[in-house]
């Protein structure tokens, strides 16, 4: 059975990358898979860029970020640098007329995120944020089932994102430093993905939050005064009166990248677990079901993102590839459903600030309606 499952960009773009770490590797693989020329890279210094050029198979290492951004031969800039640098780099790229893919968080404050949304609208270029878990086929299947009413009226939403890479006092990373990562760590880093997925799949917006956060270690190996949180627990309500809860932790032993969402309605429950992305659990009062990815039996969007036949597992890099391919397709004028843009990055910043405020004051906080978004496309 034939169907349209392509995620290949309609034309060959020249992509430039800022940053030389893990995320630059992921972005460059996705750009290559989408048919782009891996044209240039810049990093914190020329030596770092030169090493990354060889490691990633990039055509050219640039002496500075400015040289890369202002090269007329570069069509799209991928920002893969520490959080605090995102605003200045994305701003420079947009002002240079480039399309931009900026790692999350888009910005560490709502004010800065709003500025980037407005700037992207003025520039008229494509500007996206990699909330890539949207691009797992079974996530799209869950979303389609909820949108079609198969789950009934939603009553509860729950989710968690658990990791253990910062479990020990000796575990350290630049993200621990509020000066580089921003005032929130665990929530801004992975809670942003969780909330984006909960809202994307359910179709409902979080309007009130009550949160608690904890920092287990006041000092780590290379940071003696840690101000960012290791974990966050929260309860929330949506615009439709649905209640929910979430747990985000970077200190959960044995959990490597366990992103889970579960949405219950009057007819059924849907659950997705990112560590088992080929399946969707469908719970019913009389008989539950484990739905295995099979493009011939899925909704159109889920089938489109199923680039491998049933039984051949797809995972994180496949989802990232699909995100970048859809970004490049949008650059070519083909705007596909579910592509996360700078507005979604702003939404994440609004939720992060609300969570921080609630955890500090110990009270419920209303999530701003983000009136600054009105009329901004």
Image (cartoon, grey):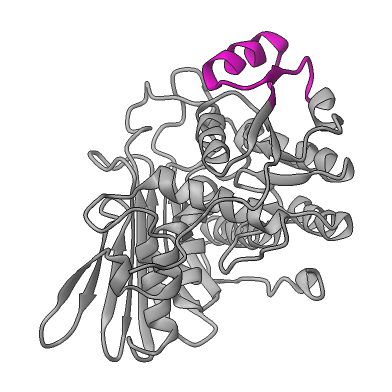
In the rendered structure, the answer to whether residue 306 lies left or right of residue 94 reads: left
Residue 226: x and y in percent read 52, 31
Front residue of 168 and 156: 156
Q: Position of residue 139 (x, y in %)?
A: 39, 65
The verdict on residue 56 being magenta is: yes
Horizontally, residue 277 falls left or right of residue 289, namely: right
Above or below: residue 221 compared with residue 200:
above
Q: Quadrant of residue 126?
A: bottom right
- Magenta stretch: give its range: 40-65
Which residue ends up furthest to the front in the rendered image? 1
On-image quarter of the N terminus: bottom left
Closer to the camera in the image, 147 or 331: 331
The structure residue drawn at horizontal position 66% and vertical position 20%, both measured from the top left corner, is 59
Specify whether 80 is left or right of 373. left
Let me know if residue 108 appears in the view: no
**x, y percent for residue 328:** 65, 51
Extreme residue toward the left, this view: 287
Q: Measuring 39% from the left and 24% from the top, which residue is drawn there? A: 171
- Check if residue 64 falls in the magenta segment: yes
Q: Residue at x 76, y 42 (%)?
A: 90
């Amino acid at each position: 059975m034939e169907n349209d499952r392509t995620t290949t960009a309609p034309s060959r773009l020249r992509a430039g990358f800022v940053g030389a770490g893990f995320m630059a590797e992921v972005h460059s693989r996705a750009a290559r898979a989408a048919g782009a020329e891996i044209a240039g890279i810049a990093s914190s210094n020329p030596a770092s860029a030169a090493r990354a050029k060889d490691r990633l198979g990039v055509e050219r290492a640039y002496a500075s970020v400015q040289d890369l951004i202002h090269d007329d031969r570069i069509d799209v800039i991928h920002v893969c640098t520490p959080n605090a640098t995102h605003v200045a780099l994305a701003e420079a790229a947009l002002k240079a007329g480039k399309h931009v893919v900026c790692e999350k968080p888009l910005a560490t404050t709502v004010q800065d995120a709003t500025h980037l949304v407005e700037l992207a609208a003025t520039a008229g270029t494509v500007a996206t944020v990699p909330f890539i878990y949207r691009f797992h086929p079974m996530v799209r299947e869950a979303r389609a089932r909820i949108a079609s009413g198969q789950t009934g009226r939603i009553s509860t939403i729950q989710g968690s994102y658990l990791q253990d890479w910062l479990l020990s006092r000796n575990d350290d990373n630049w993200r621990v430093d509020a000066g580089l990562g921003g005032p929130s760590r665990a929530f801004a880093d992975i809670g942003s993905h969780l909330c984006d997925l909960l809202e994307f799949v359910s179709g409902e917006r979080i309007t009130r939050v009550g949160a608690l956060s904890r920092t287990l270690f006041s000092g780590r190996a290379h940071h003696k005064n840690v101000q960012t949180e290791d974990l966050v627990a929260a309860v929330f309500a949506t615009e439709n009166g649905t209640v929910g809860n979430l747990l985000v932790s970077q200190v959960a032993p044995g959990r490597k990248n366990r992103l889970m969402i579960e949405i219950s309605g009057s007819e059924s429950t849907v659950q997705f677990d990112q560590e088992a992305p080929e399946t969707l659990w469908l719970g019913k009062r009389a008989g539950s079901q484990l739905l295995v990815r099979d493009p011939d039996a899925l909704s159109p969007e889920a089938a489109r993102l199923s680039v491998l036949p049933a039984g051949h597992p797809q995972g994180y890099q496949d989802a990232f590839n699909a995100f970048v391919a859809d970004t490049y397709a949008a650059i070519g004028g083909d705007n596909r459903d579910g592509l996360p843009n700078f507005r979604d990055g702003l939404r994440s910043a609004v939720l992060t600030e609300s969570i921080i405020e609630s955890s500090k004051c110990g009270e419920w906080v209303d999530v701003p309606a983000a009136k600054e978004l009105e009329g901004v496309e």
